[in-house]
Image (cartoon, rainbow, N blue to C red):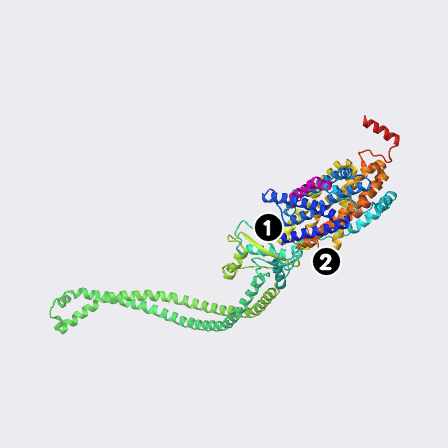
Amino acid sequence: MGNQSMIRLMYVTIVIITVMLLIVYRSFATAFLTLLIVMVELSCGRGVVAFLAYHKLIGISVFASNILVSLILGAGTDYAIFLIGRYQEARHAGEDRETAYYSAVKGVSHVILGSGLAIAGATFCLQFTRLNYFNTMGLPCAAATLVAVAASLTFGPAMLALGSRFGVFEPKVKAGHGIWRKVGTVTVRWPGRILVVSSVVVMIGSITLPTYKPNYNDRIYIADDVPANQGYAAADRHFPVSKLNSDMLMIESDHDMRNSTDMIALDKVAREVFHTPGVAMIQSVTRPLGTPLEHSSFTYTMGTMGTKINELIPFLTDLTDRFTQMADITDRMATLMRQQQELTGQQAGASHISLKGAQELKDVTVTMRDTLANFDDQFRPLRNYFYWEPHCADIPMCWAMRSLFDMTDQVDSMTDAVDDSLKAAVIQDAVTPQLVEVIGKSAAELDNMRKVVLTEQSTMRPMLTQMNELGRQMMDLGYAFDSSKNDEFFYLPPEAFDNPYFQIDLKYFVSPDGKSARYMIYHDGEALSPEGIDHAQAYLPAAKEALKGTTLAGSRVYLGGAAATYWDIQDATKTDLLIAAIAAFALIFLVMLLITRSVVAALVIVGTVAFSYSGAFGLSVLVWQHFLGIPLSWLNLPITFIILVAVGSDYNLLLISRYLEESKAGLNTGLIRAVANSGKVVTTAGIVFAATMMAMLSSDLLSVGQLGSIIGLGLLLDTLIVRSFITPAIARLLGPLFWWPRLIRSRPAPAQYRETKRRKLRR
C-alpha cells in the first residue's frame, strides 16, 4: 500500500505542479521545461537514494520515501522558479538574454545553495535522533536534497541557457510590481503596526498550540479496508476497546513464587495496579479471568470454617444430650458402689471371725500333730510290720492300721495348710476395711463426676447456641465477600497448587521455574491516546510500592506493551525533537550567517521561521483536531518542524539577499525594492511548494496527508505573512542594526563619494 500510495502521490504532485506552472507562466513550453528540470532533479535524487539504500549504506522507510518525493518536487520547483523569475525580471529591466541569464544565475545561485544546504542540513540533523521513524529520514532526505541542489545549479542554468536561445522563458506578461511595491511601502512607512497586526495573525494559530494532543494510534491514519484495520474493527465489535493493545507487567524474583505466601504479594500487585486510573481489567495468576479467583479469599476460608462448625453442631448437640445419660449412669454406679461398700463392710466382719477360727484351728492342728508324733514314735515298729507285710491289703485289720498310720503322716501337711490359711485370713482381715474405705471414696468421686457432667452439660448448651450463631455469621461473611468480588484478603491454600485447573493458570502466567510472573493490563479507553500513555506511567510505581515489605521486596519489575512502548516513544520524541531542533537551528543559523554575513539577520531568519512554525502547527491543530475531529499523528511535530524551519528560511533568505543587493539605494528604498522585486517570485514559489505538500493529502496514509497539510499551511503562512510583512517590518525597525556586524548605510552615498570610490576600485 505504501509503494502504490507513493506512486500516486508523485503523479498527483506532478499534475498540481504542472497546473500551477501553467497558471504562473501561461506557456506550455516554459511549464514543460520547468517541469523537466524538476523531474531530472527528482530522478537524480531518488536514484542516488535508491543506490545508497540498495547497497545498505543508508536505511530508508516508506514514510521517508513519501516525504522525499514531495520535498524534492517542492524544493526543486522553487529553485526553478527562483531562477526563471530572476531571468524574467532581468528581461523586464531591459537586459538582453545573455545578460539576463548571467544576472539570474548570479542573483539566485547563492540563495539556492544556501536553501539547499539549510534543508539538507536540517534533515540530516534527524540522523542524530534515536527513533528509526526519524533517523531513517535524515540521510535519504539530505542526500536527495543535495542532489537536487546540484541539479538545480547545473542542469537548471543549462536548461535556462538553452531555452533562452529560443525565447522559451520570455515573460508573457508586462512587468508590474504594484501590489508588492505597495506592500513594501506600507511596511516601511508603518513597520510597528504591520509587525503587530501580522504577528497577531500568526498568533491566532499559536494560541491553539497548547491544546495539541498527539495521537499514537496509527489505525485512524490507514484505510478502513486494510486487512489489519478490518481485524481491529472486528475485535472492537466483540471485545472492549484496546483489548488488542494491552500492556504487560512482569515481576522477576530470585526464588520460586509458587507458594501461598508469594501469591498474596502477587495479588497485592494486581490489586494496586488495577486501582490505578484508566485500568479496565488486569489478568494475572491470581486473576486469570480479570477478577480474583473464586473462593480465594481469607474471608471465604472463614466462611468455610463456619460451614464446618455448623456441620459439627448436631454432633455436639447429641453429645451434650448424652451428658444426661452419662450423669444417670454415674449416679447408678455410685449407688452400686455404696451397696458394694456395705457388703464389703460385712465381709470385713466375717474376715475378722475367720481370722480367729483360723488361729484356733492352727492351735488344734499343732497339738494334734505333736500328739500323733508321740504315737508314731511308740508304734513305729508295728507300723513297719504293716508296710512290710506283702499281704496287708488282703488282711482287713492290717490294711486299716496301715491306713491309720498313713493318715498320721498327713497331719504335717494339714498343719502347713492351716498356717497358710491363717496368713491369708490375716491379710484379708487387714485389707477388707481398706477396701471398704476405697469403695466409699470411689462412690464419692462418682458423685462428683456426676456433678461435673451436669455442669458441663449446662455450660455446653449456651455455647452450642453461640457456636451456631458464629458459624452462621462466618458463612454470611464469606458469602458476602465472595459475592461482592472484593479483591482484598487474598489467600490461596497450599492444596490449591495441586489443582489441575490452577496448574493451567500457572503455566500461562508464571514461568516454568516459578521465578517470573506476568500481568496483562487492559485500558479503560483507548490505550494509544495521551491519556492512555499517562495512565501507563502509573503502573510501575504502583507495582513497586505494592512489593514493599513483602516476600517479593526487591524483585525486578518490567513493563511492556502498546501504551508502554509509546510512552518510551513519547519520551524519546521529546529528546529527539530537542536534539534535532538545536542542531537544525544551529546549522541553519550558520548557513544564513555565511550567506548574509550578518548575525542579526541570521537570527531574524531563524526566529521568524520558528514563530511562523508555531502559528502553522497551531492552525493545523485547529483544523484537524478541533474542526475535523481527527487528532494529529505524533510523527508530525518533529518532521514538520525540521522541514518548515529549513524551507521557510529559504524565502526569507531570498528576500534578505535581495534587500542587501538593493540597499545601495538606501535601506528604506532597498527594502521596498526587495519586497517589490521578490514578492511575486517568492509568493509563486511558496504557493507551488505549498500545493506540492498539500498533494500529500492524496496518500492512503492519513498521517502523510496531515504532514503535507501542516507543511503547506506553514509555507503559505511563511510566504504570505512572515516573508511579506514580519521580516520586512523587523528589518525596517532595526535599520542598520539588522546587518550587524556589517556596516550598511541607511541612505545612499553621495554621487561624489561614489565616483571617488569607483576610481579607487579601478586603480
Highlighted range, magenta? 137-161
Q: Nearer the viewer, residue 18 or 459?
A: 18
- Read off the residue under disc 1: 558
Q: Does 585 appear in magenta?
A: no
Q: Where does the image place residue 36, in percent across and percent down from the top left?
A: 69, 46
Q: Say whether disc 1 or disc 2 marks the residue closer to the N-terminus.
A: 1
Visible residue check, residue 638: no
Tag 2 residue: 629
Q: Residue furthest front?
A: 166
Q: Quadrant of residue 400?
A: bottom left
Question: Which residue is located at x 61 percent, y 59 percent?
Answer: 227
Q: Position of residue 350 (x, y in %)?
A: 37, 71
Q: Nearer the viewer, mark 1 or mark 2?
A: 2
Q: Amino acid at mark 2?
A: Gly
As helix, strand or loop, the secondary structure at mark 1 comes to: strand
The image quarter in which residue 55 lies = top right
